[in-house]
Amino acid sequence: MSIHEECGVFGVMSPVPFDAAAMCHIGLYALQHRGQESCGIVVCDDGLFVSHKDLGLVSEVFTKEILAKFPKAAMAVAHTRYGTTGATNRNNCQPIEVNHQKGRMAIAHNGNLSNAAELRSELELSGAIFHTSSDTETIAYIVTRERLTAPSIEEAVSRAMYTLDGAYSLVLMSAQKLICARDPYGFRPLCFGRTADGVWVVASETCALKAVGADFIRDVEPGEIVVFGPEGPVSRREHCGEKRKRLCVFEYIYFARPDSVIDGRSVHAARVEAGRVLAETRPAEADIVVGVPDSGLDAAIGFSRASGIPYGIGLIKNKYIGRTFIAPGDRADQVRIKLSAVEEVVRGKRIVLIDDSIVRGTTSGRIVSLLREAGAKEIHMRISAPPFLFPCFYGTDIDSRENLIACSHTVPEIAAITGADSLGYLPAEELRRLAGCGDYCSACFDGDYPTRIPSDPRKDRFERRLSEREK
């Protein structure tokens, strides 16, 4: 498995100043799985923004000394990132901060705009100067432009949403308000809750709410803007119902933590269901079912329960490194560092190996090799997602069909390339059983894009435009 999702967002608002940075720090730990490239926290100290952002994991960026420098404050926003748009550098760290004549703003964004290139070009022609290559800065510019004439920051966000297209779950902080917004398609998750002492918490996933002791209130609906002020949350729904809901189904398959609940659907339950479907539609004769940690484990349990084949822990994950496929750079060479086979479990056994996806096939081949070296007799690979056949423009780092092994090889050929004895994918028509409904986006599997396709989908498109102009 080697695809990327770009980030997690988090925000807090309290009736009185408190250690907001410390709460954000805990929230970011809970969302670290959504991005390991960079992270940041911005707190609002009575209108003064204090921030720290850098490349690295949450534990690396936020030391005790750094956290001690943050003042007590009533509001804060935070972000952890893997960039699907923009290079890996400090300039692209979020939250992005803006100072303008109508006040300060900090914004954290999860998703990708499908019309970012067009909007950025329009803004540049009108005199805007960009400091990052992330499309989050485009959102910040659009909101700032609308704020010049809008009576409030939430009205500016609403007006901006008529211009933005694609995936965006936002947490935005002004000097007085915390605002969250979800695009009308609802591509990416967003929810909010409240602690016992009255702190409102916004997060990409419910697991982050639980981590800071907040009770889940509800999901932010597609198209909804929620404004947190002294009187509590106020919902604006003028964009709700504009589009058919299209939550990314890969949130259930891979992105989200299994203990999260997204739009009323347990991620763990969805993955167990995927395993059951695989056992029904892609059965195999074997002695043991083994899941690839971590996102293959729940589906392996489902396969085992449905097939009657015992579940075994045949692969052990090194808990002190992150997701090899989310870390920037070459991930294939990191497989041996990340995983090791339990020889006593797999030696001489026919194995059903459950993983969440195959993109290029390199990582899957390395995992099969690990099991072969440990003495596995047969390896029947089962994938809890359909084959990737199309690029994604909404936050998954697949910008070209050239890198998708399923576009150029048959299933038996992919099995041979990875070294598996057999291979079976989840049938695309069964995705509904994972999501619990039909309101999901599966464009990376079937090419059914809810929005216009971007004119330039490459991750480094803004860096390329700059270098091309300089030639």
Image (cartoon, helix red, strand yellow):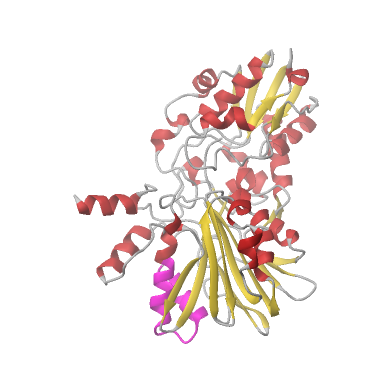
Residue appearing at x 68%, y 49% in the figure = 257
Residue 320: image location, x then y, percent:
67, 40
Placement of 171 over or under 417, stated as above or below: below
Residue toward you, 27 or 141: 27
Kindly tell me whether residue 203 is visible in this rendering. no
The secondary structure that dominates the magenta segment is helix
Residue appearing at x 52%, y 24% in the figure = 411
Residue 295: image location, x then y, percent:
66, 39
Is residue 153 inside the magenta stretch? yes
Q: In the shown orientation, is residue 467 left or right of residue 423?
A: left
Q: In the shown orientation, is residue 159 left or right of residue 10?
A: left
Residue 240: image location, x then y, percent:
55, 70
Placement of 67 over or under 176, stated as above or below: above
Instruction: Give the residues in magenta.
Output: 139-163
Task: Specify the quadrant that holds the N terminus.
Answer: top right
Quarter of the figure with residue 194 = bottom right
Is residue 28 inside the magenta stretch? no
